Amino acid sequence: MRIVFMGTPEFAVASLKALVNSNHDIVGVITAPDRPQGRGKKIGVSAIKAYALLNKLKVLQPDNLKDELFIKELLALKADLQIVVAFRMLPEIIWSMPVRGTFNLHASLLPDYRGAAPINWALINGETKTGVTTFFLDNKIDTGKIILQKKEIIDENDDFGTLYNRLMHKGAVLILETIALIEMGSVKALPQINVNSCHLAPKIFKKNCEIKWKQDANQIVNFVRGMSPYPAAWCRFNNDILKVFHVNKINKNNLDPGEFKSDGRKYLHIGTQTFDLNVNSLQIQGKKRMDIEEFLRGYRME
């Protein structure tokens, strides 16, 4: 089959790599246009573009997915199947183009956690399992018929980074299995059910990442896990902004919510609505990420 792959971030690279390594016929790769990145605002390429160029794959980077020239270029690729991993919402003229359809890889067990940030929200909500889903695209977001799913257990020590990595690789395997079913004509895609009882996973913005110390300690632990290392939970500390990457609960409640206590050398405790929390890893604005002892050695407590 002639396959067009669509994706942008690192999460999508594992899937494209699996396709290349299994000798599938990748006739085109669609990714985001080059954008200014970092503090220096140098023009950077997406992770998918970098991998595609390294493997001499044809790359298209449309600003507008409804642009007539782009649509002509896509039609000229004569794809039998399109695969989408971490990309934009496609207009119907694009997803309905291939004879075998267009399917998407989503990092949750749909219909649970539809939206842009399923891994973050599963951790924030304290879930103990999640997974990956392939489904055929339709004209709404994450609502199409399900092809395959694989479950993944969430360990209590998982954070966004560790779970992201496992789901990225599990998703790549699921994509290969999905293609095999489509090639054999054995797909039995099922509609999503029990939708009204499911969680949503909306995009997360910086303003939503502030830690609310008046919450339950377990809620805060899960919130930090779901944001670590990216986009990172943060709090105001003295006159500084701290990104917090790891905390653990202490079985005592001596501090008021948001109140902190430290010996200036080895520990920093902060109060919540229930139990106090021990801060283990953090980053002050403009500095690198540090463990608590390194941070306290260079920070003047007020």
Image (spheres, rainbow, N blue to C red):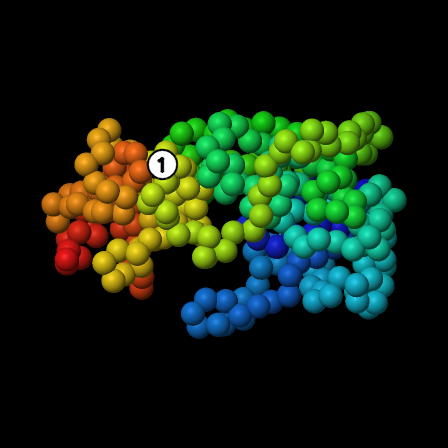
Viewer-proximal residue, 52 or 192? 192
Determine whether 284 is above or below 39 in the image: above
- In the rendered image, residue 199, in percent from the top left (x then y), is placed at 59, 37
Is residue 109 rendered to the left or right of residue 264?
A: right
Viewer-proximal residue, 232 or 85? 232
Image quarter (top left, top right, bottom left or bottom right) of the N terminus:
top right
Viewer-proximal residue, 196 or 63? 196
User: What amino acid type should be assigned to the residue bearing mark 1?
Assistant: Asp
Viewer-proximal residue, 17 or 82? 82
Circle 1: element type: loop
Residue most extreme to the right: 99
**Residue 102 is at least partly visible in this image:** no
- Residue at 26 percent across and 55 percent down: it is 237
Q: Residues within 10 Å of mark 1 (few under 14, many from 20)?
A: some
- In the rendered image, residue 69, in percent from the top left (x then y), is placed at 82, 68
> Residue 112 sits in which quadrant?
top right
Image quarter (top left, top right, bottom left or bottom right) of the C terminus:
bottom left
Is residue 299 rendered to the left or right of residue 55?
A: left
- Residue at 33 percent across and 45 percent down: it is 213
Determine whether 256 is above or below 285 in the image: above
Residue designated by label 1: 216
- In the rendered image, residue 144, in percent from the top left (x then y), is placed at 76, 39
- Residue at 85 percent across and 63 percent down: it is 72
- Residue at 66 percent across and 29 percent down: it is 149
**Residue 74 is at least partly visible in this image:** yes
- How many numbered markers are drawn? 1
